[in-house]
Amino acid sequence: MRHLYLHVPFCTRRCSYCDFSIAVRKRIPAREYVDAVLREVKLLGATDPGREPGDSEHGLQTIYFGGGTPSLLPPDAIAALLTTLRDVFRATSLRNDVEVTLEANPEDVTPEAATSWRRAGVNRVSLGAQSFDDRALRWMHRSHDTARIVTAVRTLRVAGIDNISLDLIFALPAGLERDWGRDLKQALALRPAHLSLYGLTVEERTPLARWISRGAAAAPDDDRYAEEYLRAHSRLAAGGYQFYEVSNAARDNRRSGHNSAYWSGRAYSGLGPAAHSFDGKVRRWNLSAWEAYRRAVAAGRSPVASQETLTDEQLELERVYLALRTDAGLPLASLSGPLPSSTARWLEQGWAHLRDERLVCTPEGWLRLDALVRDLTGCRTTG
């Protein structure tokens, strides 16, 4: 297994838009979490011959600590997990070319923490900036301000971590008066290696959904979404960044190796509550609640909540959808027949183009991706 994800569910508060599987805690049960994940590793080695320790010829290529808020774990807990992974995969150390990403909130980045992360093997940090507007950050229930983002980036670089990604959210309600162009300008001024841009969506059972239901907030506007998305493409391209996936741009080819594995359909393994795994045919996921997960592994039971075996039709739909999300596009040779006549409209409108015998979406096409996938497969997508 070359791509490993660890879900760290803990947060000190829930952001207004978040529907992720998290556990809000004032005290982070770091020791309990490390013990639970290490038990899961042992259970996998004992019960799943397909994932025996050390049986990957090339070893791990990427490790990703996601959440939740992984940066809430003490640095020694992160170091303990990485040390065990070295042992499990029979490596005396994680090679320099293994991408080890830690998601972090700006307020958690201190000189001591950043130095400890680097010593433990972390060489990439995904920083949850979200905005450079303090009013918008408060509305999102974020705990940091703009100044803290700038300080965090500088602190990481001093500690020797220069592969930094910034998350930003666009299409915020107009009433917030957030200046998206200003946000992009401030993000570009920091020269991160990578940027991930996500349009605001309304998920059930979130504070945002409740605000909208009682009229305290406006639902995201489709026109605003499209305008800000396309503006980001032009601004980032002028700044030397290339969008290599719908929501992700990098400079100097500093793409996320871990997320690229997802988008190319490669197998990956997940540890921790709510973590997903995929072997190329079967997708499975762990119990989502922290306490249910912890109790299961403590009792020596598998934490897997359920699994599904994808049909050939589902695999084909995912293959087409994921390929079109990237700048590599979809090989025409992989289609069962010629391009549907309806796709000609995409080429005429400039929503897609043909390059090296591949169908590649433009930014305008990425905004209409579901419709293109339906044209090509006759299936309905939910992406």
Image: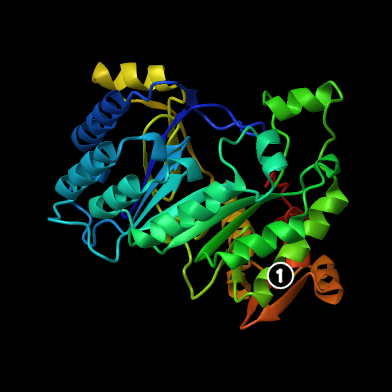
Quick one: SS at disc 1?
A: helix
Quadrant location of residue 42? top left
Q: x, y percentage for residue 354?
A: 70, 79
Q: x, y percentage for residue 228?
A: 78, 58
Say which residue label 1 marks.
235
Q: Reply above or below: 143 against 269.
A: above
At x 22%, y 57%, the residue is 94
Q: x, y percentage for residue 144?
A: 56, 40
Horizontally, residue 379 falls left or right of residue 7, namely right
Horizontally, residue 55 falls left or right of residue 297, namely left
Q: Residues within 10 Å of mark 1 (few under 14, many from 20)?
A: some
Amino acid identity at mark 1: Arg
Q: Reply above or below: 291 against 18.
A: above
At x 27%, y 48%, the residue is 116
- Using the image as rendered, state which of residue 262 and residue 82 is in the foreground: 82
Q: x, y percentage for residue 164?
A: 46, 59
Horizontally, residue 74 falls left or right of residue 356, namely left
Q: Is residue 38 visible from the viewing direction of this image?
A: yes
- Using the image as rendered, state which of residue 1 and residue 331 is in the foreground: 1
Q: Is residue 315 visible from the viewing direction of this image?
A: no
Q: Going by the picture, which residue comes out furthest to the bottom? A: 356
